[in-house]
Image (cartoon, rainbow, N blue to C red):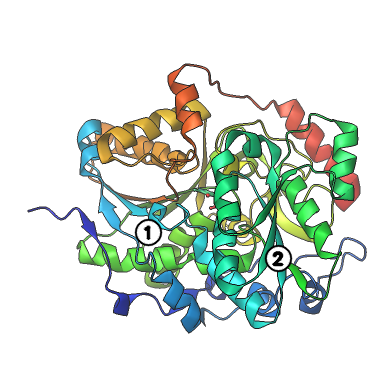
Amino acid sequence: MKTKKILLPESQLPAQWYNIVGDMPNRPLPPLDPKTRRPVMPEQMNGLFAEELVRQEFSTERYIDIPEPVRELYKIYRSTPLVRAYGLEKALDTPARIYFKNESVSPVGSHKTNTAIPQAYYNHRQGIRRLTTETGAGQWGSAMAMACNHFGIALEVFMVKVSYMQKPYRKMMMNTWGAEVHASPSTLTEAGRAALARNPDDSGSLGMAISEAVERVFLNPEQTRYCLGSVLNHVLLHQTVIGEEALRQMELFDDYPDTVIGCFGGGSNFGGIGFPFLRENLTHGRKTRIIAVEARSCPKLTRGRFEYDFGDTAGFTPLFPMYTLGHDFHPSDIHAGGLRYHGAGPIVSQLLRDGLIEAQAVPQLETLEAGILFARTEGIIPAPESAHAIAAAIREARRAGEEGTPRTILFNLSGHGQIDLLAYERFLAGELRDPEVSDEELRRSLDRLAPIVG
Ligand SMILES: *Cc1c(COP(=O)(O)O)cnc(C)c1O
């Protein structure tokens, strides 16, 4: 009998997160205060994030212990299965062995709970009563809603308007766990009102929703904090449970990947699966290719510029060193809402600059086609975001076929698509297209950045 999937017993779940900053040949540049252009001190971020999260954001320790209450909650769904995709391999008639890590089994259907749980926990431990956040496709908002409910924290979510309209079930999930949800841009904040004055039909963006959520913290700064679902170092740190488990599970399959793939919005699921394998490259001479796959209509890694830029549209955050399209770049309304973010996290950006990871961009239609093939061969309907990783895995498997070389490919299935069915319906009806981003459009967006941050 062939082994299809491997899970780990609870006793073997990771006890620590892996902080790749401790092993990077060049550490990420520091975030800067936009007014003084001097490095931001950790204390300056304590008003926005829980103190322990700020400590982790600046940490260079290689390993950080996962607190017991967090490990307990992880057990609701961890370990997640590592699965051999025999069905997909057969359909592709490839000599490659394809594995995927199935993060879709979490209560909200994606990897986002891996960081939502510790973020809610550290805020709770500090006595914070209220959190604000943004959400794109609704995965992050759902994860925070679940985690905040557990720790008795009130949550306010700003949801990108296009997703709010397309994905009413995500809003219902958040409401079920007790969170309050607003379509962004909203009339509740200065940033939202200004956006609506410029364009009443503004469909929103993650950058704008972040501005709104951050602005709300100032309403009650004593007891309110903000939390972010991707991009920042502490978020990527928490996601490394994915790769740490996968390393052990690959060992139990008696195999090792030469290619590890994650889709890319801000870098959290990519870093989560990739960094533990990159550690093996950096410290044990392994040569695994680690590939980030972005949406071709939001191409910060493949066509963006490495530059200090704001994390949000209104410019409330510090300046982060990142591959960016410019903080007011407005991505097309593709269905992979979680990939519609203008920048890449500082760690991933530095790793790409140093040539330690690779980046690819895949167009929407190819990703949905890949998602459908995956659904029909492996049974799981993937999130449109995750379908980017599948599309890249299929490309790699086809290349293995052409070259006639065996390959071992591992990708992260960051989430399922059961609440994104509209994307598949529209694809099957032939209604979707591949939005193009012109060089001119990118240049204009980046030119707007120069006088502000330069
Ligand atoms: C949020 C999300 C992403 C993109 O965010 P990253 O931080 O880049 O991982 C990808 N897939 C799913 C299912 C998501 O919910």
Residue 81 % position (x, y): 30, 59
**Residue 441 located left or right of residue 284:** right
Q: Which residue is mark 2?
A: 131
Q: Which residue is mark 1?
A: 287
Image point (7%, 53%), residue name: 1
Element class at badge 1: loop
What label does residue 371 carry, if any?
A: none
Give above or below for 369 relative to 375: above
User: Label 1 CB, ligand 1: below 8 Å?
Assistant: no
Image point (66%, 60%), residue name: 228
Q: Is residue 342 visible?
A: no
Give above or below for 108 relative to 91: below
Give above or below for 99 relative to 81: above
Q: How far apart are the alpha carbons under marks 1 and 2?
A: 41 Å
Element class at badge 2: strand
The one of 296 and 340 positioned closer to us in this rendering: 340
Amino acid type for the residue under numbered disc 2: Leu
Which numbered disc flags the more N-terminal residue, 1 or 2?
Answer: 2
Residue 396 % position (x, y): 35, 39
Q: Is residue 94 visible?
A: yes
**Residue 56 located left or right of residue 258:** right
